[in-house]
Image (cartoon, coloured by chain):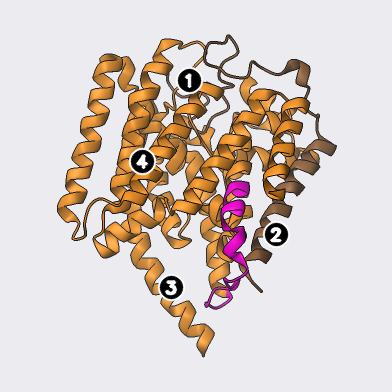
Chain colours: A brown, B orange
Amino acid sequence: MTRRFGIIVALLGVLGVVVIDWTLGVPPDPFRSPDPMAFGSTSGASGAICTFAPGAQQ
Amino acid sequence: MIRILLIVGLLSTLAVSAGVRFSLLLSLGLLIGFSLERMGFGFAGPWRRLIRDRNAQGMMAQLLAIGLTAIAIQPIIAYAPGSFLGAIAPVSVTMVMAAFVFGLSMQMILGCGSGTLINAGSGNAIALVALPLFCLGSFVGTLLVPFAIESTPHIPVSLPALFGVQGSVGATVIGLIVIGLIAARYSQAPLWNRRLLTAAIILAGLAILHVLVAGQPWGVVYGLGLWVAKAALGLGWDPATTAFWTHPINIAALESSILTDTTSLTSLGLVGGAALAAWKESSDRPFEQSVAIWFYLVAALFGLLLGISSRLAFGCNVGALFSGIASGSLHGWAWLLAGFVGSIVGVRLRDQLWSLAQTSRKS
């Protein structure tokens, strides 16, 4: 077996995550999408970020 | 040619079905994954080479990438604080301990936050075992973060807020130069590698574009925990029982498609980009590693620890180290020091276990 098998497994995993989320969750709504870029727009960051610390002192 | 058409089709479909911003974020993830895999730029590997081989080339490239990003994104974030958000997080005892564990764990599987995704995308068997546990750990970490915040003081320190943007950029650049001088003094190899420096400049450019598009710096682990949280939701888990997932930002993320989540898109892109970069040579490289099966269990365990620790440390090498320092967050510097000490332990431990795993396989 070669690394190509591993790549196919990884891509199938990614596809699986997207398909499961799409079918069981709420599909995206393009009419509610933010502006293409946050820069120069009023629709900025989502705030869903790795440094998110709920309840920490601000 | 077929692969290019497929990607253009995928990005166009995403732009139409979700929005242009999300298509741009996936593009950035693909470009980062492709560049890092093709140019051999990473975080865990260069730290290993510095510690083990006294070769600071990769470390110097990392410092250059962080410095260039900091110079650009701190003024951008300060320009519109309502729309833009820096990767600012608290410093605490648990945060430092978690960064230590992350540094150790990333050496055990030779894959950090971005590295594990890229290694998995390039077909690496150990990363493919570690990645699902990394995701699970990231979710478990979200359940532990509120307890950590309640039990120990967590103090966010933003250098731009303390010193102004110019002072913060200056302090960040000086700090990076100091780290570079220490690494250079320790190194016994030539300091500069043109390929890695080129990769650093490309990565900095893509990280700056990420801020302009998303309004926030590049991150990895938030998305991984979100995927498991959504799966848990489907299995009957009640997010109302946790302080983390009852915050409006996280409720919105749970109720939306992952195709509209910033870190999910770039993380999916990292896997895809690495797969594209590695595809051609993948048929000549063996899938199996020359180690005993039990090492895969070790990889799974440390994958889980990567996930838990990266949440408690408020980011991995990307969200905390790269984007934290570039944003002017003191926690990024604390992460760097604690993560590096953890890596020193991790390099020693991995060498011993890897050797044992190779011996076990032969016997």
| In this rendering, position of residue A21 left or right of residue B357 | right
Residue A2, above or below B254: below
Q: What is the chain letter for disc 4?
A: B
Q: Which residue is mark 1?
A: B85
Same chain under badges 1 and 4? The reply is yes
Q: Residue at x 34, y 22 (%)?
A: B158
CA distance separating discs 2 and 1: 35 Å
Q: Which residue is mark 4?
A: B335
Q: Range of the magenta residues?
A: B271-293
Q: Residues within 10 Å of mark 1 (few under 14, many from 20)?
A: many
Of the two numbered discs 2 and 4 in the rendering, the one whose residue sits closer to the viewer: 2
Examine the structure image and report whether residue B272 is included in the region drawn in magenta: yes
Kindly identify the amino acid type of the residue bearing the numbered disc 2.
Val
Image x and y of residue B276, in percent: 61, 52
Q: Which residue is mark 3?
A: B353
Kindly identify the amino acid type of the residue bearing the numbered disc 1.
Leu
Q: Residues within 10 Å of mark 3 (few under 14, many from 20)?
A: some
Q: Secondary structure at mark 1?
A: loop
Q: Which residue is mark 2?
A: A9
Disc 1 or 3, which lies upstream in sequence? Answer: 1
Of the two numbered discs 1 and 4 in the rendering, the one whose residue sits closer to the viewer: 1
CA distance separating discs 1 and 3: 41 Å
Image x and y of residue A10, in percent: 67, 55
Same chain under badges 2 and 4? The reply is no
Asked if disc 1 and disc 4 are in contact, CB closer than 8 Å, the reply is: no
